[in-house]
Image (cartoon, rainbow, N blue to C red):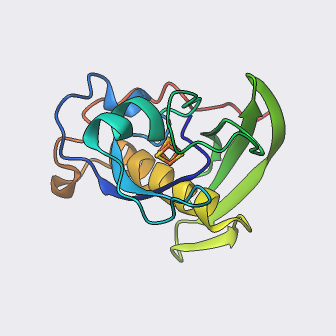
């Protein structure tokens, strides 16, 4: 689960992630904070590792006391080969507050259904990018992620 105020920008080159594919956004990401009063702040590597990429960042000094949720998680609900259905869940106190689905068309490379919140949409794009790198290994995949097991994949009911 990632912090709801995290705006991921690019994959982290930091090699400290032990199981990158198990991270909420499919691997470690660098980016910036969008918490009120801290917009655009670049968190430290330690903050990225301990807070931004993981959510429930109650020890983060930038985390607002009043917030809609503590973390956002994603999973693949369905992968037909040409279309992907992503599930997102926003949590507070380890309980879901909002959830929904997003749809991506692989053949056209376009979102059919995107999220209205640009941060959550950006997180979904990062998650999708990481998922596709695992699904279709390519030289550009680099070292992140290496694993092929998608522990956060959901089966559609
Ligand atoms: S964990 Fe802290 S620094 Fe990182 S995005 Fe959330 S509020 Fe900002």
Please tell me whether residue 2 is drawn above or below residue 108 in the rendered image. Answer: above
Q: Quadrant of residue 92?
A: top right
Q: Position of residue 112 (x, y in %)?
A: 69, 71
114 vs 120: above or below: below
Q: Residue at x 25, y 47 (%)?
A: 12
In the foreground, 30 or 86: 30
| Screen quadrant of the N terminus | top right
Quadrant hosting residue 44: top left
Q: Position of residue 22 (x, y in %)?
A: 42, 27
Q: Is residue 29 left or right of residue 121?
A: left
Q: At 29% across and 34% down in the image, what residue appears?
A: 46
Report the side of 33 relative to 120 (left or right): left
Q: Nearer the viewer, residue 98 or 47?
A: 47
**Quadrant of res 31:** bottom left
Q: Is residue 102 visible?
A: yes
Q: How many marks?
A: 0
Q: Is residue 81 visible?
A: no
Image quadrant in which the C terminus is located: top right
| Front residue of 48 and 153 | 48
Image x and y of residue 140, in percent: 19, 57
Point 26% across, 22% down: residue: 18
- Could you say where residue 91 lies in the image, as x and y percent from the top left? 74, 33
């Amino acid at each position: 689960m990632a912090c709801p105020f995290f705006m991921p920008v690019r994959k982290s080159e930091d090699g400290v992630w032990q199981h990158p594919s198990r991270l909420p956004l499919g691997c470690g990401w660098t980016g910036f904070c969008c918490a009120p009063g801290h917009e655009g702040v670049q968190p430290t590597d330690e903050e990225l590792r301990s807070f931004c990429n993981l959510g429930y960042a109650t020890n983060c000094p930038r985390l607002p006391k009043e917030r809609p949720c503590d973390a956002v998680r994603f999973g693949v609900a369905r992968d037909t080969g040409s279309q992907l259905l992503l599930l997102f869940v926003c949590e507070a106190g380890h309980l879901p507050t909002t959830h929904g689905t997003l749809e991506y068309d692989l053949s056209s490379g376009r979102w059919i259904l995107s999220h209205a919140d640009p941060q959550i949409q950006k997180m979904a794009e990062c998650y999708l990018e990481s998922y596709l790198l695992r699904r279709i290994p390519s030289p550009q995949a680099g070292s992140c992620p290496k694993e092929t097991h998608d522990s956060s994949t959901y089966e559609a009911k």
